[in-house]
């Protein structure tokens, strides 16, 4: 064998050895081909950061801020919601709307709309509320399947964190990303409006996507842009721990509210206390029965009619009013939009009658 042939033979042997060394070894993964999991549904065409941008661009128009005001017009809190039906049906957390006297929904920029809202259903125990606004062209989200979530799966949270951008301010909602950290968690969140001081959430999704005050009620999304959870709480004493109500738990509550919405209740817009002889003597009132006005909601029918704190309502639409309960019964005999005469006794004892237009009570 010539030197050239020997060199070629050695080179061929080395090449074969290298190819053999780089060939993958067969590894038994412990399952047969028939047991392989089904492939996930196709994701958007973009990959990486582009895919996240695509999901956000699709869903942000469906995310709204929820402004909760007290009777005197003071901002009580800010939360988030998302559109589930084009005809103005919005899902959020119950604790966002709890104790509010007026609810306002603000749609996403660039052309935000400010819409009065009321609760048409929900479940306080599950911290779910369903709102209705007068609109017919809102872009709805797509509800996903939270039972299909897997640990480590990428998710996005969208909401008005810390109230930023919530009330016609620039920038729109906040977007954070993370993964599904745990499933089927049971946690207790502090809530002074719940007996015992806390609300228990069962079967919730844990994520490391940042969830801050103001995010409550916003959507947790998979990378197909489907809502898989409703962002609810973040752990104040830990980092990167947030919780969301699984959408599979919320779906039945949302559908029930849509199919059987609570009717619109009439609303005068006053907070009152029953007048007794003792209270009349203490406050120096000219009458010893009626409904003493302790608060008037800004922009309500009572406010626009000129009713003020310190007056006593003694009749509504001709029906005598001797207590707060009687006032509620008298209002309840009417419909939102009705004009009613309200007879008042002023602190000095003078009587006057104003005409008020009843509004819609935000809570059922």
Image (tube, helix red, strand yellow):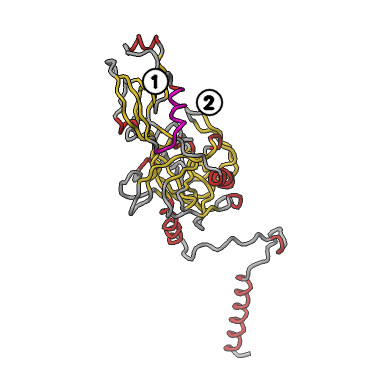
Could you say where residue 114 lies in the image, as x and y percent from the top left? 35, 46
Could you say where residue 333 lies in the image, as x and y percent from the top left? 46, 31
The answer to whether residue 103 is visible is yes
The answer to whether residue 160 is visible is no
Q: Is residue 329 magenta?
A: yes
Choose between 55 and 327: the one closer to the eye: 327
Q: Which residue is found at the position 49% from the left and 42% from the top?
A: 130
Q: CA distance from mark 2 to mark 1?
A: 29 Å
- Above or below, 122 against 156 in this view is above
Residue bearing the label numbered 2: 195
Residues packed near mark 2 inside 10 Å, few (<14), some (14 to 19) or many (20 plus): few
Q: Is residue 361 magenta?
A: no
Residue bearing the label numbered 1: 291
Q: Nearer the viewer, mark 2 or mark 1?
A: 1
Choose between 43 and 2: the one closer to the eye: 43
Residue at the bottom extreme, as displayed = 2
Horizontal side of 34 relative to 361 (left or right) equals right
- Label 1: element kind: strand
The answer to which image quadrant residue 343 occupies is top left
Choose between 355 and 311: the one closer to the eye: 355
Horizontal side of 223 relative to 318 (left or right) equals right
- Label 2: element kind: loop
Label drawn at residue 107: none
Secondary structure, magenta segment, majority class: helix
> What residue range appears in magenta?
325-337
Residues packed near mark 1 inside 10 Å, few (<14), some (14 to 19) or many (20 plus): many
Could you say where residue 94 lies in the image, as x and y percent from the top left? 49, 37
Choose between 216 and 141: the one closer to the eye: 141
Could you say where residue 203 lies in the image, as x and y percent from the top left? 59, 41
């Amino acid at each position: 064998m010539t030197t050239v042939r020997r060199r070629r033979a050695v080179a061929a042997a080395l090449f074969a050895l290298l190819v053999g060394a780089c060939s993958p070894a067969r590894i038994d993964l412990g399952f047969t081909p028939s047991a392989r999991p089904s492939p996930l549904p196709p994701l958007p065409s973009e990959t990486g950061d582009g895919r996240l941008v695509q999901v956000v661009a699709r869903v942000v128009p469906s995310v709204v801020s929820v402004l909760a005001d007290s009777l005197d017009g003071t901002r009580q809190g800010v939360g988030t919601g998302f559109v589930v039906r084009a005809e103005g049906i919005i899902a959020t957390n119950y604790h966002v709307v709890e104790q509010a006297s007026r609810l306002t929904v603000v749609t996403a920029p660039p052309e935000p709309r400010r819409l009065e809202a009321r609760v048409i259903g929900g479940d306080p125990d599950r911290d779910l509320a369903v709102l209705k606004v007068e609109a017919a062209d809102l872009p709805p989200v797509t509800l996903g399947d939270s039972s299909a979530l897997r640990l480590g799966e990428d998710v996005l949270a969208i909401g008005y964190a810390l109230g930023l951008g919530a009330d016609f301010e620039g920038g729109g909602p906040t977007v954070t990303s993370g993964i599904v950290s745990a499933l089927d968690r049971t946690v207790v969140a502090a809530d002074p409006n719940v007996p015992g001081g806390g609300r228990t959430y069962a079967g919730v999704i844990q994520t490391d996507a940042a969830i801050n005050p103001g995010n409550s009620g916003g959507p947790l999304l998979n990378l197909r842009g489907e809502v898989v959870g409703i962002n609810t709480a973040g752990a104040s004493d830990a980092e990167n721990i947030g919780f969301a109500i699984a959408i599979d738990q919320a779906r039945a509550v949302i559908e029930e509210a849509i199919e059987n919405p609570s009717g619109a209740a009439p609303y005068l817009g006053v907070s009152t206390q029953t007048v007794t002889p003792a209270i009349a003597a203490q406050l120096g009132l000219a009458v010893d029965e009626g409904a003493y006005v302790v608060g008037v909601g800004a922009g309500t029918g009572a406010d626009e009619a000129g009713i003020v704190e310190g007056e006593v309502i003694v009749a509504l639409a001709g029906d005598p009013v001797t207590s707060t309960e009687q006032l509620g019964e008298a209002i309840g005999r009417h419909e939102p939009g009705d004009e009613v005469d309200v007879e008042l006794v002023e602190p000095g004892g003078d009587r006057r009658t104003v005409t008020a237009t009843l509004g819609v009570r935000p809570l059922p």
